[in-house]
Image (cartoon, grey):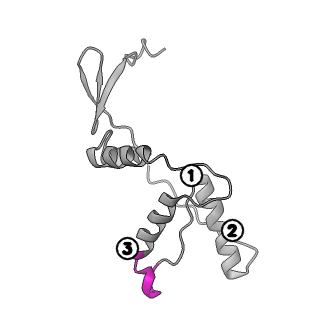
Amino acid sequence: MLRTIGFDKTYVRAEGSYLYDDGRNRYLDLLTGWGVFALGRNHPKVRAILEQVLSSELPSLVRMDCSLLAGLVAEKLIAHTGGQDGNGLLRVFFCNSGAETIEAAIKFSRCATGKPRIIIANMPSMA
């Protein structure tokens, strides 16, 4: 099927917004939706930080633990939003998907308000 629609490429390299195939052809990748596309693939600063983290051999995916990196990111987010003086974020909850984010928002809202119901407003399509 991929051959039929012209997508049977073997990508060997990625840089920024571009993919490169084994024939040295460059393709502008217009895919969106994941965090990698905000900065581009293999962004030098992101790579440097990832290499630093990986070389430190930190434990990860420990069930009942808050990782050092998540804690540091949470502290930075709170400080960045003015949370230290009480006018910004006070806590951070990390999620791994949009569905989990919505579920958490509903649960936190119900807990904070004490109300058992929520109102959902769907925006009409602009198409």
When asked about the image quadrant of residue 75, the answer is bottom left
Measure the alpha-carbon separation of dots 2 and 1. Answer: 16 Å
Task: Give x and y (percent) for residue 68.
Answer: 51, 60
Residue in the picture at 41% in, 69% down: 76
Q: Amino acid at mark 1?
A: Asn
| Real-space CA distance between mark 3 and mark 1, rounded to the nearest whole angstrom | 22 Å
Q: Is residue 67 magenta?
A: no
Residue 104 on image: x %, y %:
64, 63
Identity of the residue furthest to the front in this view: 56
Q: Which residue appears at 68% of the width and 58% of the height?
A: 64
| Residue at the outermost right position | 116
Marks 3 and 1: CB-CB under 8 Å? no
Type of the residue with mark 3: His
Q: Earlier in the sequence, mark 3 or mark 1?
A: 3
Q: Nearer the viewer, mark 3 or mark 2?
A: 3
Identified at 63% across, 51% down, the residue is 62
Q: Earlier in the sequence, mark 3 or mark 2?
A: 3
Marks 2 and 1, the one that precedes in the sequence: 1
Front-most of residues 88 and 53: 53
Q: Confirm whether the magenta stretch covers residue 80.
A: yes
**Residue that carries the numbered disc 1 in the rendered image:** 96
Mark identifier at residue 80: 3
In magenta, the rendered stretch is 79-88
Q: Position of residue 93 (x, y in %)?
A: 57, 65
Corner quadrant of residue 54: top left
Per the image, the residue denoted by label 2 is 107
Disc on res. 58: none
Q: Residues within 10 Å of mark 2 (few under 14, many from 20)?
A: few
Measured along the vertical axis of the image, is residue 73 above or below residue 26? below
